[in-house]
Image (spheres, coloured by chain):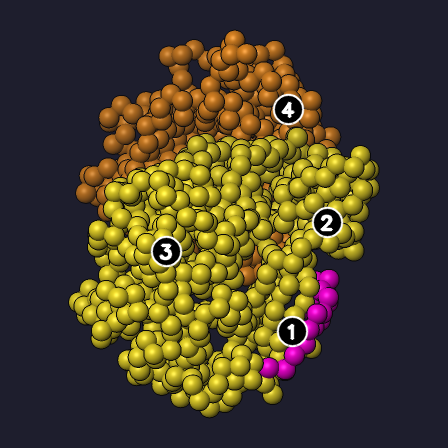
Chain colours: A orange, B yellow
Amino acid sequence: MNLAPAAHGHGARPVGDAALGVYVHIPFCASRCDYCDFATWTDRGALIDDYVAACVTDVETRVRRGELVEAASVFFGGGTPSLLDAAALLRILDAIPRRADAEVTVECNPDSVDPAKLRAYRHGGVNRCSFGAQSMRPHVLAALGRTHDPAGVARALDAARDAGIERLNVDLIYGTPGETLEDWSATLDATLALGPTHVSAYALTVEPGTPLGVRVAAGCTPAPDDDDQAEKYELADDRLTAAGHHWYEISSWARPGDECRHHLLYWRQGDYLGIGCAAHGHRCGTRTWNVRRPERYVERIRAAASPVAGAEQLDPATRAEEALALALRTRSGAAVPPGADAVVTELAEAGLVRRADDRLVLTRPGRLLGTEVTVRLLAVRAAGPQPVGTR
Amino acid sequence: MDITGSRCFSLLSHVDHGKSTLADRILELCGAVDARSMREQYLDTMDLERERGITIKAQNVRLQWKDHVLHLIDTPGHVDFGYEVSRSLAACEGAVLLVDASQGIEAQTLANCYAALEADLTIVGVLNKIDLPQAEPDRRAEEIERALGLPADELLRISAKTGEGVPELLDAVVARIPPPTGDADAPLRGLLFDSLYDSYRGVISSVRVFDGTLSTGARLRYLQADAVHDAEEVGVRRPELTPVAALGPGDVGYLIAGVRDLGEARVGETVTVAARPGAPLPGYREPKPMVFCGLYPVVGDEYADLRDALEKLRLNDSSFTYDPETSGALGFGFRCGFLGLLHMEIVRERLEREYDLSLVATAPNVEYVVHRTDGSTERVDNPSAMPATNLVETVEEPYVSVSILTPTDYVGPLMDLAQSRRGEMAKLEYLAEDRVELVYALPLAEIVLDFFDVLKSRTRGYASLDYEPAGHRAADLVKVEILLNSVPVDAFSTIVHRQKATDYGRRMTARLAELIPRQLFDVPIQAAIGGRIIARETVKAKRKDVIAKCYGGDVSRKRKLLDRQKEGKRRMKQIGRVEVPQEAFVAALRLDET
């Protein structure tokens, strides 16, 4: 285990100094990708200025209320945050008080960044960019409904580095209908050649209601094949590991020390604020989510009303279940649940988990079967500790 | 009233030829039911009877027609309930045989007519539905004369729907059917031809008195059950229960005698006065289940509910049997025996509907007679109880004599069908120019699954079927076992003819391979006869199921997804190391062979 100290958070940080993250949702895109089911719109350009103003107001309100003292990480996600003018994005970032060493990430579409924008980001405090490359094969990109070409990804990464942004993630998708193992191999090679510090590789997931989901449901496009995706996952893990990226979460690989601190917050049940429409926040077992549509968000903020659309208070049992499910995704693993010894032994014999001291960590086959492992462990939790002496 | 003033008769017809409608008209004409309380198909009291348009329980009613008393006894209209029909007929002197003037004679018309002749009844032939444009009364009358020997010019023509000809029919009943005979001073002999269970009053039996007097308060002996009961209440149905002091020879009515168990008041029982017993009436036999299946609750903890429901339902229907059994695959349940397939369906439907249960039924099977190599003989009604091949000398299976009536166009396809079911032709006879009766000896096992449905689909619904038991025959039968990861699964075991074993094995393994979700290891699914594998499929090990992304906005949604999976896991049946969803059992056992 060679996680960098910054990412190795179990009990490492003093209790009073819990890291707080801020997630800012930018719900605008130039076009919608065929697999996307996020809260994002392609026809709301006229709304951008009002939306940015609302985000700033929202942040200021939270600061005034004492909910946001100092952020350890800020993450602009979307949508396509890089669609905004640098000045607009930085107006929001400027409003967020943050630690000197705060990680500030912006999700970028290779199409919508240029050297000037990236330099402006850097000057404004952005120190990490995440590029949605998805594939380096044009026919795979076309099947996904993506508009950029692979050469654009290389230009974007070079420009970011030239601007002084060193921490660079590339998002990839594998298992797209029509993608061969050779296509995926080529995508991995081309990606690694760009020298990213972090790679996220996701199995294509068909969401109902998306153009891809409709095509698959109608039988026009084959559904992704689990065995094909398993093979591609293993290939990715081999290539990325060989290139010095270690996996630290099911779909995430990074150079040592370059793990995404903001994402680790999610997997460790840390606290984070959600700014913008459809953004989720979490604080001490209470989860909130904002209104989904950007117009509604702007309205609420203008009316000095709360943008929160709903909340759930997690009871201790649910919180413990979530903790297990989330922690199992990571390289640090989860604490062995009480009463689970028999199941753990079974899972270990099946080669899906290994025990490291008091923790349970997924093996590579186990990472691919993470749901099965999690459900089996959750079933133990639900049943409670086995009574002793009934026989 | 003088015994010569009364008439006891039944209505006989093929399904859908208008029996219940005619009964409704007769009730109206005789003023037994006023128009206000009249509802369609008055005598079919069960919801299921009205929905399916069939009569399951025999009913009777006492009517006044002019200066005569008519006892109308309605009979069950399905082949499964043939024994109840014959007991109902034993309570009568005559029968009205109803034939649809557009459809003509059907298989049950023949069966009913033969049964009535066997019971020595006077038959009044009636052509019904003459109001229909497609009715061909002249042609059908000729056909009836030829096939049944009822003179065409004596057939009445009516429309039960409009009421046309029904008064004339009642006059004919009085004129043609002889009055009952019997000695009022002889020892009491009463025939129970139906019993139903009422939760307040216990068993209410329908009774026909042949000799002697059945009086309220009398101490009675039930001869077959060898039990003594006091006649708490004696009465007639008008159709409401109406108490009377006594029933004499030729009377039909009801009897309540504090009987709590239907098994003590079976159809065919003879009641007599304990102090002065008469001789038993002929023809009693125990109803014998012909078709068996396992019934299991979908949810294991409903076992006790199922047991209670079976107990209660049996108070209403003593002709099905149930015994606890344990299946490695399905858990605790019951092996149940039924008179036939429809009976099985009805019982299952009533359990689910009236007792709010969700059930898995295993594939129906028949009862085999197994002769072991050590000379012993046993009856086996559950495939998993079949002894190992090397211990079996011979196996006999039940046969039935199947009578099929069909338009001539479909004779070819029906012969193919019967042939493919190991049928042996006994008779082919033209009843009319365009109507043929085919009689086959067929293994019961070959018709219990879907024979009737296939017959209907191959003849566009025009052919009809009736069958009766025809003994046992030895056959080359084998038990096909299905093994899941090398563990035999009793719920899928079956007994089939050797020639059909491979086909069954292939179909079942292929279907299970589709239904069983991928596990953490390869799961072989095999079909075997006595350890020899005859078919094999493999469910490949699952390699990936992981959720690709889980960020701040996804957590709740993903947790619900995991919760659903956890819930699904709870409903899995564990067979060896293999987890099988309950739905897979239901789907695999669904019969869709056509």
Please name the residue that numbered disc 2 is placed on.
B396
Q: Amino acid at mark 4?
A: Leu
| Among numbered discs 3 and 2, the one appearing first in the sequence | 3
Label 4: element kind:
helix
* Closer to viewer: mark 2 or mark 4: 2
Label 2: element kind:
strand
Q: Position of residue A160 (x, y in %)?
A: 56, 39
Q: Is residue A182 left or right of residue B10?
A: right
- Which mark is on residue B159? none
- On screen, A97 above or below B426? above
Q: Are marks 4 and 1 on the same chain?
A: no
Chain identity of mark 1: B
Residue displayed at 48% across by 85% down: B151
The answer to whether residue B183 is seen in the rendering is yes
Label 3: element kind:
strand
- Which mark is on residue B211? 3
Q: Amino acid at mark 1?
A: Leu
Tell me the quadrant of the picture where the C terminus of chain B can be found. bottom right
Query: Observer-nearest residue: B314 or A336?
Result: B314
Residue displayed at 53% across by 81% down: B149
The answer to whether residue A85 is seen in the rendering is no
Label 1: element kind:
strand
Please name the residue that numbered disc 1 is placed on.
B438
Q: Amino acid at mark 3?
A: Asp
